[in-house]
Image: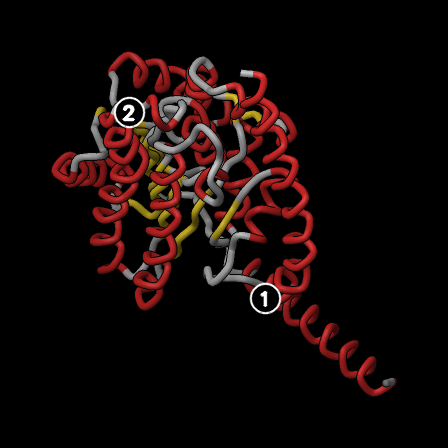
Amino acid sequence: MPSIILTSTLLLLLLLSLSLFLAFWKGNRRIVLRGEHVLITGGTSGIGLEFAKLCILHGAHVTVVGRTEIKLKQALKVLEAYARDSRGKEPVGYISDVAQPSSCEKLFTEAEKKHGPVSVLICCAGSCVPGYFEELEPSVFENQMHSNYYSAVYPAQAAFKRMKGRRKGHIVLTSSLGGLLGVFGYSAYSPSKFAVRGLAEVLYQECLPFGIGVSVICPPDTKTPGFDEENRYKPKETLLLSQGAGLFSAEQVAKEALNDILRRRFMISTGLQGKMLVNVCSGFGPQVSPIQLLVMPIMRGICYFVQRQQERIIKEEHKRR
């Protein structure tokens, strides 16, 4: 028995040492944004706009992309003032529907003429349309795939083609905690975000030979204009289930996420519940550290009780209705 305990203790120490070494090694390979070109889709509001501010602070050449001229002008006005106050580089903006492949090719060609090759792509374009499954129109499911999945596929493909030749770059996709687990009322939204997470795992492997990094952000509920609009249509069950998860500011989500992106981490979230879900849902995904393996059984145990509570909430609300 003492030998088993000793062996287990040594193995635990070995795993912890390896985890610390990997964290230190990755920490020395941080991405430096100064002087680099960062292109942000969905950069005219919410998390994307906050990413743009932070990248300006880091000394990057920032290009923001939106779909409407009014929002783009408003965002550029904010970012230009931010750049002046922080003595950063003046941003540029383009109107483009990045869910269309031809639009993305044109976008990257024009943007790279202005600021040179895109070193970091951050895909933040997307939307959420909640509702009861049986009440959603077929067009909602199609539009959610275009808004959330195709808007990540085509910019990522355009960036990868260019980064591949330079053997340098980093691609950031935005999924959601709703892309890690199914949530009541998100039958159109969650599958589109699951698809983004799957795309990120495939890209991670395909980018490896070329030294291109990949990250996927899984934000929790975040206070954005889109979130306010989404709340108008959420089923009561969805609102009740999200109460315990907390609500984060777009600034906080972007700040924490960028810090992890610069450390080249793969799956990223914010808050205790977000980090727990990223851990327990990482499965066969890349960059699962030894310390994650050690705490995963504990996290899965906690999830069991959370799931039972969620089921109780859903059944009680069904009875009430």
Q: Callout 2: few (<14), some (14-19), or many (20+) C-alpha neighbours within 10 Å?
A: many
Q: Tell me, yes or no, if residue 251 can be seen here.
A: yes
Under circle 2, the secondary element is: strand
Residue 212 x %, y %: 35, 58
Residue 45 x %, y %: 40, 22
State which quarter of the image contains the N terminus. bottom right
On the image, numbered disc 1 is attached to which residue?
Answer: 22
* Quarter occupied by residue 306: top right
In the picture, measured across the screen, residue 95 lies left or right of residue 296, that is left
Q: Tell me, yes or no, if residue 247 can be seen here.
A: no
Distance between mark 1 and mark 2 Cα atoms? 37 Å
Q: Given the image, on which type of amino acid does mark 2 rest?
A: Gly
Residue 219 x %, y %: 50, 36
Residue under the point 57% across and 65% down = 25
User: Of callouts 1 and 2, which one flags the residue occurring earlier in the amino acid sequence?
Assistant: 1
Q: Are marks 1 and 2 in contact (CB under 8 Å)?
A: no
The colour scheme applied to this rendered structure is secondary structure
In the picture, measured across the screen, residue 247 lies left or right of residue 56, that is right
Seen from this angle, which residue lies furthest bottom? 3
Q: Given the image, on which type of amino acid does mark 1 rest?
A: Leu
Residue under the point 68% across and 44% down = 305
Seen from this angle, which residue lies furthest front? 319
Residue under the point 62% across and 31% down = 245
- Count up the numbered dots: 2
The disc at residue 66 is 2
- Out of 98 and 230, give the one closest to the viewer: 230
Residue 63 x %, y %: 31, 32
- Out of 158 and 188, give the one closest to the viewer: 188
